[in-house]
Image: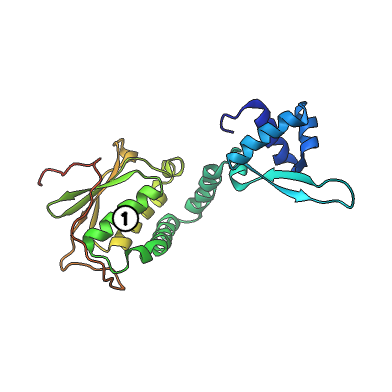
Amino acid sequence: MPVVQRTRRIILEFLKQRGRATLDELAQESGLAPMSVRGHLSVLDRDGLIGYEEERGKIGRPRFVYSLTERGHEQFPKSYHTLCNRVLDAVAASSADAPASLARSLAEQWAGDYSGRLAGKGFDEMVQALTDIRSEEGAMACCEPTEDGYLIHQHHCPASCVAARHPQIICAAEMGFIHRLIQAPIERVSWVQNGDATCSYRIRRPTPPVTAPEPSTRSVTSLEISPICQPAPAD
């Protein structure tokens, strides 16, 4: 769990175990006065880690019952990458063709998830949209213009714990995703798995030019390039 003040950590752990709890129950668990616990609950509520609802009984004042929010549940350790590696271990062991087949399926579904964002865009717009998508996914991507297209540099691998063990699936799926989304020739020019600092791809401008389906009326006068990347020297 990320660093949280001790009493608030006790509250979060108690709510995780119990599901729901009242102020008095939390005070008893933490060994503090209800007024003190209420202050900690206010901080946790402000941070979006807990929520509460009002319960009314037949008699007496209503009481508040507290529980974890989705963000609160996310404070606890997860091991998705371990499970994912086990699944991919089983896939890789099932047959010689299974990793490549899975990579193709992942690439197709991945590209399908974002095809609408590229609808009607020309090549330059599609490359910029791809850069934005990969950054949103955590890859810290930037694009760099070249004489025949662009270089896409990814400074972080969001799936590094899995890609290091199954590059024939994860890295192949990423390359297939980019090719399917842009519909242009693509070449890997650097790879973290080889010890490089980035995973970078050269995307060549298609001939004749490619436009994504469903033309848009939006026109482009310039393309904003991330300042992280400087133009590459001509080949």
Looking at the image, is 111 positioned above or below residue 61? below
Q: Quadrant of residue 125?
A: bottom left
Answer with left or right where residue 140 lies relative to residue 233.
right
Which quadrant is the N terminus positioned in? Answer: top right
Furthest residue to the bottom? 214
Q: Is residue 216 above or below residue 85?
A: below
Looking at the image, which is closer to me, 81 or 217? 217
Q: Residue furthest left?
A: 234
Residue in the foreground of this view, choosing between 52 and 149? 52
Position of 52 with respect to 202 (left or right) is: right
Q: Residues within 10 Å of mark 1 (few under 14, many from 20)?
A: many
Residue 13 in percent (x, y) is at 69, 35
Q: Residue at x 30, y 72 (%)?
A: 213
- Image x and y of residue 222, in percent: 19, 56
Front one among 83 and 70: 70
Q: Amino acid at mark 1?
A: Leu
Q: Which residue is mark 1?
A: 130
